[in-house]
Every structure is written in C-alpha cells, then in structure tokens.
Image: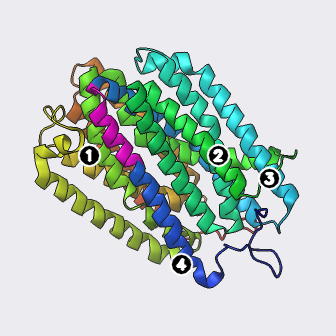
Amino acid sequence: MSAVRTNTARGRRSPDAAPSSGLLGATAVVSIAFLGANALAYVFTVVAARQLAPAAYGELAALLSVLLVGSVPASGLQTATALRLGGRRGNTGALARLHATSLQLGVTVCVLGFLLVPALADLLHLPTATGALWLAALLLPQTMVQGYQGLLQGAGQYRRLAMLTLVFGSGKLVGGVAGLLIGGSPAAALAGMCTAAVVASACGWLATGRPGLAGGTRATLGAALRAAGALLGFAVLLNLDLILARHHLPADASGEYAVAAIITKIAFWLPQGVGVVLLPKLADADGRSRALPLALAAVGGLGAVLTLGTALVGAAALPLIGGAAYGGTLGSATWVFAALGTLLALAQLMLFSGIATADRLATVAVWSAAAVEAVVVQFLAATGRLSLLSLAGTALLVAGALVATGLLRSRRGRDVPVLAADGMVPAPGA
C-alpha cells in the first residue's frame, strides 16, 4: 500500500483522493460513515441495556461517558493532524512526525488514565476497578485510530477515512457485545472494545501506508492540545448529567437515567452532518450570515420533530429502548431528553461558530455552563430535591442558556477572520 500523499502535491493525486468536483460526494461518504458509526454505538447501548441489570448498565454508561471525555485530546489531535498534513506536499518526514505525535499523545493519555483509576472508581462508586482499568487501556489504541483518521483526512483520502471509521465503529460493537456475552459485565464489554480498537489501529496504520516515527513533535502536539480545549469543555457538558446521575442517584435510578440519555444522544447525533457540511462556510462573514441561520433552523426543526415524536410515544419510550425494567419513574416525561439533545446540538453549532470567529468567550461559556450545572445539581442533592426529572431539567435549562448566549455573541460579532494559510483561525489582532 502506498504511503499517504496530500492533495496538494503538484501534478499528482492519491488514487482514492477526491478531486475538487467530487468534494460533495466525498463529504456525503464521510458523513454516512460518521452516522453509521454513531448508529453502531447506539446499537451497542441498546444491547447493553438489555443484557445488563439497571445498576450494571448505569456503571457501563458512566464509564463510556468518561471515555468520551478522555477521547477529546484525540479529537484535537485529529484536527491538528489534518490541518498540518494538508499544508505539506507528500512530505514523508511530516507524516512520520505526525505519526509520532499520535503515539506520544496516546501513551500520555493512557498513563494519565491509569493514574486516575482510583479516583474514578470512587467517583462512580464502581464495585471493582477492573472496568476503569480497561477504560484507561482503551485510550491508547483509540487515540492512535483518530490520529490515523487525521492523516487520511489531511491527505484527502476520504474513502479510506470512511472505511476506517466504519471498521472502528463496527469493531467496537462486535468486541463490546462479545465481551457482554462472554463476561456479562461492564469490564468485559470494555475489554472487548479495547481488543477491537487495537485491530482498528493496525488497520489505520496499514491504510496510511505504514508510516514511521520521527522527532520534532512539539508544535503538532501543542496545536492538538489547543484544539482540544473547547472540545473538552463541550464533551464534559455533553456527558455531565449522566455522570452526576451515577454519582448522586441510587444505582437503579441512574440506570434508568442512562437509558433515557440514549434519547438525548439520538437527538444530538442525528443532525451532526449539518455541522460537518456547513462548518467551512462559517469562516467568512458572508458565508456565516447565510449558513448559520440555516444550520440552526435545520437542527432545530429536526429536534422539534424528534421531541414531538418522543412526547407522542410517551411512557412507552424507555421500555421500547431498554426493556420493561425501565420507565417506571420518568413516565411520559422522556420528551425532555429529546429536547435536551436538540439544545446540545444547537450549542455545538454555536461553538463551531465561535471557533470560526476566534471567539475565546465560546470556550469560556461552555466551561461555565458545565460548572453551573454541577453546582446546581450539588445544591439539589444537598437539599434532598434531586430526582431524575430535576436533573434532566437542570441540564435542559443550562443548554438553553448556552444557546441563547451564543446567539447574542454571534449577533454582536460582525467581522469574521479569514482562515490563515495553515488552516488555523488567527486570534483577534493577529
């Protein structure tokens, strides 16, 4: 297999790189793969909810939420890798440095995960630390996979990127379900997912042309960590209510909240393609003024349909997803979770807009929202007023406030900086 080459090479293109006229088709392929991978993740959550008792499923759901947070540095790595490789011309040295950066960051995140296992087991009231140990081990191959995805994205090899995304998603489904069937525990499911991630990492290495390793990783590593800042805040906010439910509520109640949170994730996942397609148009004032209102309307409209549909299904929604053991407490209030997912999807679009306009307050707003939610939930728990519905309502109000403040900032921000030559948005005054 030939080594990865960028689309910017003079007079040459990678065999499966999309030409300019095929960018729309390439975007469609990658978007379908992204939605397919999320659908596979949804299938796993449904299977796990049916295979595990509510208390055990609550444990697994909380660990998977922590995994999403721990994967944020890898998302920043993928972004920085794609941007930096896109500015090279088939430079094998740059490819080796980017590969080395992936390995360096993966090892760092993995070691940090192992160090935090005791604190994590205490925070989530885990019966044993085995699940947390497998979670920490999973961080290394998952970071490597996202690094390879960044290499393929930067090289314009969209079909390979789509295939690797699907291999990773389907592998985690098969590995996780196999772990559930064999071991019957959250730790066994994570062990199966870790094994699948190692296989996907090997596939990524082959798909990128078996790159080597080279020094000089400091610049790329710094770019990856900076890109992860805003994404980390949003990942914390996206999963905070589930973690707080596991920490504050009884095990059975946290399990029911985890099943209801599947509705939140569905409402959040479905419109992800809108942000993927429209994000480049947010980089200039004219494009942003047209694209952002359309994107918000599309996501809001889809979310309204999902919320209405969930309200019509009513109390049957949770038993439909997780089985007869769920839904006794929430009843017909499951529509709140669809509305929450919609607001989080809108908040993500506003965060993309803030990143495109170099709005540092966008990152501050996301972290502040997470802090406010945690404080309010702590107050409700201390005063004995915390319940499934009050926790979901708090998350809903915080997400709504985040969207509202984002809209206010976007109306004030008239001038949007143009992307610099290296693909990064310059800071104001730069």
Residue at disc 3, secondary structure: loop
Residue 237 percent coordinates (x, y): 43, 41
Residue 153 percent coordinates (x, y): 65, 63
> In this orientation, which residue lies closer to the viewer: 299 or 172?
172
Residues under labels 4 and 2: Cα distance?
28 Å
**Which three-letter amino acid code belongs to the residue tagged 1?**
Phe
Where is mark 4, residue-wise?
24
Whichever of labels 1 and 2 marks the residue nearer the N terminus, that label is: 2
Disc 4 crowd, CA 10 A, few/some/many (<14, 14-19, 20+) = few
Residue 48 on the magenta segment: yes
Residue drawn at x 36%, y 59% is: 270
Where residue 333 sits, quadrant-wise, is: top left
Taking 419 as reference, is 386 left or right? Answer: left
Residue at disc 1, secondary structure: helix
Where residue 377 sits, quadrant-wise, is: top left
Where is mark 1, residue-wise?
337
Whichever of labels 3 and 1 marks the residue nearer the N terminus, that label is: 3
Q: Which residues are magenta?
A: 41-54
Residues under labels 2 and 3: Cα distance?
12 Å
**Which three-letter amino acid code belongs to the residue tagged 2?**
Ser
Residue 283 on the magenta segment: no
Whichever of labels 2 and 3 marks the residue nearer the N terminus, that label is: 2
Taking 106 as reference, is 117 left or right? Answer: left
Whichever of labels 4 and 1 marks the residue nearer the N terminus, that label is: 4
Whichever of labels 3 and 4 marks the residue nearer the N terminus, that label is: 4
Residue drawn at x 51%, y 46% is: 171
